[in-house]
Every structure is written in structure tokens, then in C-alpha cells.
Amino acid sequence: DEAERIEQPQSDLSDARACFDQKKLQQDQSVDFYVCHSCFRRQAKLHRCAQCKFAHYCDRTCQTACWDEHKQECGAIKKIIKAPSENVRLAARVLWRIHKDAGIASDSQLVSVDELEDHVTDLSEEDLKQLKTDVHNFLEYWSYGRKQHSTDYISQIFGIIKCNAFTMSDQRGLQAVGVGLFPNLCLVNHDCWPNCTVILNHGNQSAVSSSLHSQRRIELRALGKIRAGEELTVSYVDFLNLSAERQMQLRERYYFECTCEHCSKHIKDDLMMAVAESKPSADKVKEVNAYSKECLEKIEKSRVEGNYNEVVKLCRECLEKQENVLADTHLHKLRVLSVASEVLSYVHSFTEAADYARRMVEGYMKLYHPNNAQLGMAIMRTGVTHWHAGQIEAGHAMICKAYGILLVTHGPNHSITRDLESIRMQTEMELKLFEQNEQVYHSMRDAALKKQPLASSSSADENIKGLFCKK
């Protein structure tokens, strides 16, 4: 089958949806960016499928590469006009794949999808209500000739998705854009301090011919040396929560009680709730904790509304209140620092953003596993923020540190690692110029940022000027 034709880029945001949660994107600060349904690259203008008016692609190459997955979905969406939720679309894709491949997609698949845990009998009343809605929407959406399924079997598939689906991110690894089901990885058990990590590798779709593309794949990567016979584990939840909170998340989402060493011994809980060295009174700590919780809710509300001036104002006020009361490893302070650095970077207040990001990363490094992927990404963003702030020495050092972590967590062929390697090489050359003549470095940088012609004021290598012509 040939892929259906694609329309030219659309300006209507309501149509810019893929196999992901549109609400999440609407809450993201970069709401004007779409995500390609094939390579997951974020772009301001994408081509829309002319048949279903739903799927979006970078170009015909991406569309052709994705056609085998989209073919059934395209017809189903055309039938009901409006695309259903991401879970309904994923359930349909699972069943289409089961019919096509008899449950096993390849010889390397160790278990069929319908053998995975579904925990439907353990669902809460609220979850059962949502399940009933999903099944109803699925039956309206589903089309596969005369092949029909019982309500119980469809419910089982939704239970499997709820308990086993992985969050998928865009190519930059910064924005969650959907869910995917990978049967082999569902066999890997949880540990809050794991020896492996799961990474989505988007492959390479840059070649003109789709036959030369490397496929999108999910990877299980070791975080260090693993002894023979040692169980492979991954973390199902973010470690940056108190052990009791992580255990609650795991009970509610995956229906088991975590008894890993870090939860049983409450390892690092003390740091996550630590107070400042000035040893404030218990009443003062209680007051600031309550204020921080309330303030974080206001910060998130303003961030979602796009009121970034209010976000910055609230963050500054909250950090001032936390000063000399909460330690820099306290979860409330880290969350405020994270939002403050992110929003200030977004509005190009890089110097202030760099200070907050540095404090945040210093706290993260005391809490996270040294090869944690989220730590590596946070250090990378902090390094880039320092670079944009003109603090080339600190920026390059952080970028190098992040690169070392991402080589482990993402591997050298991941698009994020490759992009970071390019940044590392550029900051390394800029650092050399800075060390040769600091004044020339800053004058060239200022001129480049203002998009002014670079006047040669020294005998420094002319080629280095090209470094400041930022894309």
C-alpha cells in the first residue's frame, strides 16, 4: 500500500495531535511546536495526513516510514472523525499487531502481550469507571473486518496498558508525548536504585530514502558493571520522592509494595527533607513547608497559564522564604529551583537561570544515582544555560559531565548524545578562545548575539569567529 498524500503545514493547533496526550502539550511552554508521528521530532510546521486530518509528519519520508503503523489507524479515525485518547489508540494498535503477527512480533519477543499482568480485578472504583469509558470508545473506534473481541478481552488489554506502558518522549527527551508497550521490558522488575535504565532511541530518519532509516527502538542499558547472575532492574518511578511517596505511587499504578533497600531503609529521605545548617525551629520548618506546598501549586497554575512573570515572582518569593530554613537538597526547594531555572531560560534571563540551575544540580547530584538519565539531562540543560549566560568555563565543564552520563544512559548513537557531542565540541573551542583572550571572547560573543558584523581586533584565529554565528 502507498501512503496517503499529505497536506501542507497547518496553522490550526487543534489538529496537531499524534499518538500522545494533547493536553500535556497544551500545558507545555512550547505549545507552538508539534511532534512528528514518525520520528517524534518537534517542529513548528508539519504536514498533515490528508485522509484522517490527524497524523502529522516532517515530510513524505517520515510519512512513508510510518505508514505500516498508521494504515489501520487512519481508516479508523476517518470513520469516527475525531481521534480518541492515546490509550484507546494504543489498544487498537496492540490488537492490530496481534492479528498481524499472531501475538509475537519477532523471534526475539519473549512473551506475548496478552500474557502480561493486567490487574483489572485490583482496579479502584474510579479506575473501573474510566475503564468502562475506554472500552466504549474503543468499540466505536475499532475496525478489523469482521474480527470482534469480547468486552472482557478488551478490558484486559486496557489493564495491561495501564500496568505496563512506558512513557515516550520527543527526540530531545524533554517532553513526554505518549505511551508505548514493549513486552520484553515488562518482564524487568523494579528497584528504586536500579542497575539498568530504559531509553527510547528514535533511530535515524534523516536519510532521503526510508529504506536507509534506523528504526525507533526501546533499549535496556546497564548503568554500571552487573555481576553474573544479578537480576536486571529498572525504576518505574522517579527516585526524587520520599520512599513512602514512591511506595504509594507503585501501589496505585503497579499494585505491589516496594521492599527495595532504599525504601526499606528510607535511604536519602533525610536529605530530601533536610533543613538548613542554621538549624531553624520545628515550627519555622513546618511553616515554610506549608508555604512551599501552597506556592508550588500557584507556580504550576501560572506556568500552565503561560504567566511566566508571575511564575518568576512566585519562585523568587518562595526561595527567599526557604532561605536559611530548608537545605538545598530539600525536595520543595529543588522543585522551585527547577521551575525557576526553566522559565528564566525560556525568557532568556540566562544569568539568573544559571545560578538557580547550578544550585538545583548540586542538590540532584547528592540524591540521584551518578548515572541517572534525569540527572544527566538536568546537568546538560544547566551547562547549556551557563553557556548562554556567557559563563563558558562552568558551562563547558557541566556539558562534559553530562556527556559522560549520557554515554552510559543513552549511548553514543542516540540523537541527544550526538547533539550534545556537537555542543561539547563547540564549547571546547570557545573555551580555548576564552583562555587565549577573555576580552576578545566576550566582544565577539556580544557582537554575535546582537547579530552585528564581527570586527577583527586581534590576530586570533578567524575561523573561531564562526563559532558565534549561532543557528
Image (cartoon, rainbow, N blue to C red):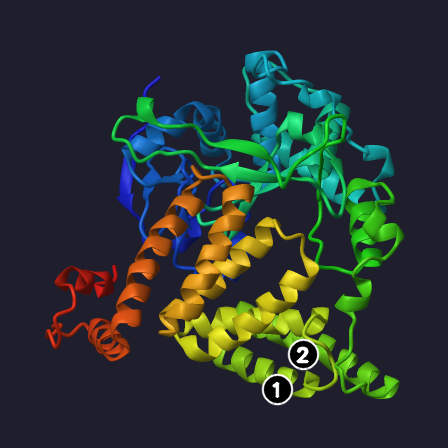
Residue 322 on image: x %, y %? 69, 83
Residue 11 on image: x %, y %? 32, 54
Q: Quadrant of the C terminus?
A: bottom left
Label 2: which secondary element: helix
Q: Is residue 309 above or below residue 110?
A: below
Observer-nearest of 132 and 276: 276
The residue drawn where x is 48% and y is 62% is 398
Q: Using the rendered view, name the quadrant where residue 278 is placed.
A: bottom right
Observer-nearest of 58 and 402: 402
Other-residue count near label 1 (Cα within 10 Å), few / some / many at <14 / 14–19 / ≥20: few
Disc tally is 2
Residue 383 on image: x %, y %? 45, 64
Observer-nearest of 343 and 22: 343
What is the number of the mark on residue 234? Answer: none
Query: In the image, 241: left or right of 352?
Result: right
Label 1: which secondary element: helix
Whether label 2 touches label 1, CB < 8 Å: yes
Observer-nearest of 272 and 104: 272
What is the number of the mark on residue 317? Answer: 1
Query: In the image, 156: left or right of 106?
Result: right
Q: Using the rendered view, name the quadrant where residue 127 is placed.
A: top right
The residue drawn where x is 81% and y is 67% is 270
Question: Is there any visible trace of residue 397 in the rendered image?
Answer: yes
Q: Earlier in the sequence, mark 2 or mark 1?
A: 2
The residue drawn where x is 34% and y is 50% is 422
Q: Quadrant of the N terminus?
A: top left
Q: Which residue is mark 2?
A: 295
3D distance between C-alphas at marks 2 and 1: 9 Å
The residue drawn where x is 46% and y is 26% is 69
Q: Is residue 66 above or below residue 439?
A: above
The type of residue carrying mark 1 is Glu
